[in-house]
Amino acid sequence: MISGGGTGGHIYPAISIAQALQDMLQDVEILFVGAKGKMEMKKVPDAGFEIVGLWISGIQRSLSLQNLLFPFKLISSIWNAFGLVRKFKPDAVVGVGGYASGPLLYAAANKKVPCLIQEQNSYAGLTNKLLAKRVQKICVAHGGMEKYFPADKLAVTGNPVRKTIVLKENLKSSAFDFFNLDPEKKTLLIIGGSLGARSINEFILAGYERLAKSGYQVIWQTGGFYFEEMKQRIPSKAEHIIIKDFVREMHYAYAVADVVISRAGALSIAELMLTGKPSVLVPSPNVAEDHQTINAKALVERDAAVMVKDNEGEEKLLDIAIELLEDEAHKAELSKNIKSMSHPDAAMDIANEIVKLISETN
């Protein structure tokens, strides 16, 4: 059983782990457990896996009537999680973070089922910290996580990414054709995570005329929630600025990109590492414990990325991105350093840890 979700940063690694297990094992049965109403309930079936939902959500940071429901949701989810574990009889349970992973792994650990968690960020999430004592193995993306977890349980595996992200040879020409872009011109890719990012969209909108006159090609993923609004608010259309709600063909987008503007979520960083793309990271200020800033700083310290604070984005973001587009030496250095941090076999390494865990407990 694999649990977690809420954002693409949890869902896509979970799917990658499941696919690696399918590649490794014959006749493996996999059941996902997510949170009702969250995006995993659609994305996981789209990837070909069965999923069941628990009635669970997080505590709102602001005063909210929804918080009054939290104890009832938690009790309901733990009760149902025990039922799912009893019915499915898993050999192992994997948690990747997100609301549903807490109740499921709590139930599985109480039933003495071998458990493994995967932490994607440089700062451990609350759910995973609470579960650390109950699980047998903890797969982490980066070294130095002993400050959050028992050292003897850790394995540094990196973050799994979608198989399609790997940039194969001769992909570039097909990618330029796909987007109808000019291979002779520099291309800026702007992504705000699976759900989009309002502040990044606002920064790009504020500098839209400058981009339109610059001659740089732009692929701008707004996120579905902001797409129509951004289209309506652009001052004029420019053929070399492609605006999309969601780029499904991300391998093409990375292939044409000279520089990427991105949030600093774990999945985004893992993809940038794998593709070796020079990037300007704008950490979201609206995440638990400011973990995206911690993620970004881990790269900045190794000269593997550039960081712009969200509250300085309107003033600095486009200046820094355009400066980087023109600086071939800096791009090459960033590309080399971020590529050296990648873990291309992360999904298979985590799958191996799961299989090892099962064999050790049988």
Image (cartoon, helix red, strand yellow):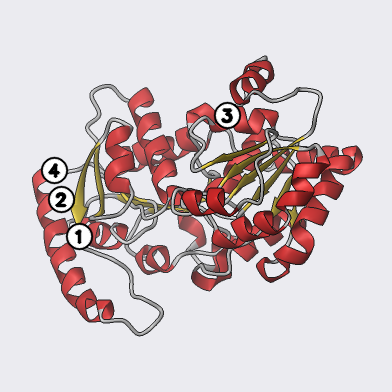
Query: Among all residues in the image, which is located at the extreme front?
Result: 236
Q: Amino acid at mark 3?
A: His
Mark seen at residue 88: 4
Q: Earlier in the sequence, mark 4 or mark 3?
A: 4
Q: Residues within 10 Å of mark 4 (few under 14, many from 20)?
A: few
Label 2 amino acid?
Answer: Val
Which one is closest to the eye, mark 3 or mark 2? 3
Task: Measure the alpha-carbon separation of dots 4 and 3.
Answer: 36 Å
Residue at position x 49%, y 43% in the image: 245
Q: Of tags 1 and 3, which is closer to the observer?
A: 3
Q: Secondary structure at mark 3?
A: helix
Which residue sits at x=52%, y=29%? 249
Circle number at residue 107: 1
Circle 3 residue? 251
Q: Three-letter amino acid code at disc 1?
A: Ala
Against 337, is 62 above or below?
A: below
Residue 67 image point, x, y percent: 27, 79
Q: Circle 4 — which element? A: helix
Query: At label 4, which amino acid type do we have?
Result: Phe
Q: Are marks 1 and 2 in contact (CB under 8 Å)?
A: yes
Viewport quadrant of the N terminus:
top left
Nearest the viewer among 100 and 209 is 209
1 or 3: tag closer to the N-terminus: 1
Q: Residues within 10 Å of mark 1 (few under 14, many from 20)?
A: many
Sooner in the amino-acid sequence: mark 4 or mark 1: 4
Q: Is residue 117 left or right of residue 142?
A: left
Q: Which residue bears the numbered disc 2?
A: 85
